[in-house]
Image (spheres, helix red, strand yellow):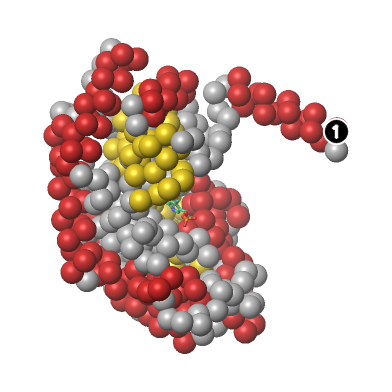
Amino acid sequence: MAGLDQRVARRLEALRSRGLERRCPLPTRRRGVAYTLDGQPVIGFCSNDYLGLASGVIASDLPENTSTGATASRLICGDSDEHRALERSLAALVDHEDAVLFSSGYAANVGALPALLEPGDRVFSDALNHASIIDGLRLARARPTIIPHRRAPEHISIATGPTEPATWWVTESVYSMDGDVADPAAITRHLARGGFVYLDEAHSLGLFAGGAGFARHRGIKPSVIIGTLGKAFACAGAFVAGSRAVTELLRSTARSFVFSTGVSPLLVAAIKVALERVVGPDGDRRRERLWTNIARLAERLELEGPPPCSPIFPIHVGDNELAVRVSRELLARGWHVQAIRPPTVPEGTARLRVTVCADHSAEQIDRFAHDLRAAFSTHLGLRPQLRRARAS
Ligand SMILES: Cc1ncc(COP(=O)(O)O)c(C=O)c1O
């Protein structure tokens, strides 16, 4: 034990010396975007609860006597009508034939990619894809070509025969740490040429009219869509949507589905309630407030360039320790914003990942923008600017 602790202590010290140690902050007394951290009241600008639904679905909204556990993998005896009905509704939301529930977005990506990719397939993966996609590709033993951020795999030949190697483009729609979006016209071109598109909609599902994600909003139909349910849906879990053939294969071979207990029936019931809210008039009102708040923060920060296309504002700092210092200063002023450092983002691109929610008031946004500008002026002598990831 002592030997293990010594080894671990060495590694922890190495992380600390590079400013890369991580700790879980502990929010208490949460009421929407307001909570306390270490006894200090703060307003959070870092959650993915974009529509402010996290305190909106509570136990009394769920059917009585809903059991907590699926008792086994769905393939053993953990399935239910409710799981299946929810999968059909989620598939309809993203305009696909069918969907399969997973316990998280991470589990969905590390399960679906190895199940879908075949040896010899060519894979193009965006340079800023999420860690769960990277890990899914590793588990698939793919040798992806990493393409510069937001570029499409163009000027390549694509074989289209059913027995020929496929050409996959694996990308996010709204990028989790950068808040920018994939090019829908390039996705359509890739599909039209016979390529496959695997699109992770973690940060866009629910944000557009009718609760749509980016793909439906922009009129594109990727081969496979990943939707996560722990962000705008304020629950947990995820789904992979595609044709019936794709979902049949996933149910038989995606290891994080096959070898994992089915999603809790309690969670299935909560996701159903969240889905009704997201697609209904309550969701419309929340979306309207969200997009108003996004525009307001951009305006108050006097950001240069085109308006943000998502609730995620990656405020560029660069240096890891400086990013932590700015976030501490904001905390002292009552704002909770996390400094995001490598390996979550590439070296030299540490940032504050500011997220806007429907629940923020206009006054909170104005005061936050004022204090963010003050903190930047003190520590960097600059105005806050979005990090616009360049093709690299
Ligand atoms: C693009 C993307 N995919 C997948 C995930 C993982 O989703 P989950 O938090 O449900 O595991 C995340 C989480 O942040 C993400 O940003």
Please identify the residue farthest to the bottom as the structure is shown.
81
Q: Who's the residue at 25% across and 57% down the image?
A: 207
Question: Residue 384's x, y, as percent?
Answer: 26, 25
Quadrant location, the N terminus: top right
Q: Who's the residue at 70% across and 28% down the image?
A: 11
- Left or right, 250 with respect to 294, comes to right
Quadrant in the rendering for residue 262: bottom right
Is residue 353 something that shows in the picture?
Answer: no
Q: Amino acid at mark 1?
A: Ala
Question: Residue 33's x, y, as percent?
Answer: 33, 46
Question: Residue 286's x, y, as percent?
Answer: 21, 58
- Left or right, 133 with respect to 224, comes to right
Element at label 1 = helix
Quadrant location, the C terminus: top left
The foreground one among 158 and 31 is 31
Residue assigned mark 1: 2
Q: Who's the residue at 56% across and 36% down the image?
A: 23
Is residue 78 something that shows in the picture?
Answer: yes
Q: Who's the residue at 80% across and 29% down the image?
A: 6
Quadrant in the rendering for residue 76: bottom right
The foreground one among 139 and 346 is 346
